[in-house]
Amino acid sequence: MSYLENGSTHRSLFRLMGPLHHDADPNRSQVLAHIMENTGWDLGRAIRAFNSMRHPKSKVLVFDQIHRMWKGCDWVPGDKDSKDSMFIVELRTLQRRVAAMDSELKKATKEIKRLNKKLANRDESGAEEEQPETNGNQSEYGRNIEDMVRQAWS
């Protein structure tokens, strides 16, 4: 957490920042100008603060991919129609992400079932006794993997 000279944080100062453009040229960046204006810092310190605030772990400033602008994490438009539109876009984005994660989970579950079945068939056929062991007992290794998979899914 980064504290400013007055004891406040970057989040408290910039969480409601309206959408602003950022440019590769620091002199044309609206975001950097806004940071310098509100803090009184020089360009170098404003760049470091911007890089800190846009970092995925802090998410003080978030990038709106539709409008290609940076905005504060808690900023919402003033008029009702724009606010509703923004929430609908964010909801649709989250729905797409959930659907993609659900698909990946189904694939992983299917793969785990396939591997468990393959492991069970291998244990039943006694194939592990015919193969030379490397780095310990292979059947014990397979059971450990199976136990880890069960724990992860329970």
Image (cartoon, rainbow, N blue to C red):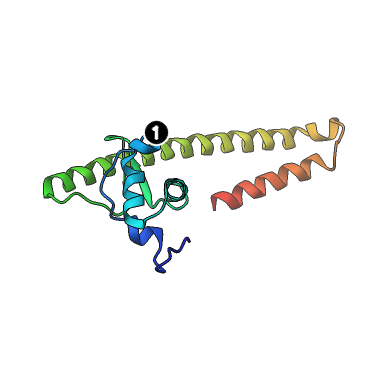
The answer to whether residue 72 of the structure is visible from this angle is no
* Residue position for label 1: 25
How would you rate the neighbour count of disc 1 (Cα within 10 Å): few for under 14, some for 14-19, many for 20 or more? few
- Mark 1: amino acid: Asp
In the picture, residue 93 is in which quadrant? top left
Q: Residue at x 34, y 59 (%)?
A: 13
In this rendered view, identify the residue nearer to me: 61 or 138.
61
Place of residue 11 in the rendered image (x, y in percent of width and height, measured from the top left):
38, 58
Residue sitting at x 39%, y 33%: 25
Taking the spot 53% from the left edge, 37% from the top edge, the residue there is 108
Q: Which residue is at the far bottom?
A: 7
Q: Secondary structure at mark 1?
A: loop
The image shows residue 148 at horizontal and vertical percentages of: 65, 49
Between 95 and 59, the one lying in front of the other is: 59
Q: Say left or right for 109 vs 5.
A: right
In this view, the residue in front, 9 or 74, is 9
Residue 87 position (above or below residue 67) = below
Identify the residue shown where x is 36% and y is 34%: 23
146 versus 5 height, above or below? above
Nearest the camera: 34 or 53? Answer: 34
Q: Quadrant of residue 27?
A: top left
5 displayed left or right of 65: right
Residue 32, visible in the rendered structure: yes
Task: Judge whether 104 appears above or below 72 on screen.
Answer: above
- 43 above or below 130? below
**Could you tell me how many numbered marks the image carries?**
1
Q: Residue 60's spot in the image, x, y percent?
A: 38, 52
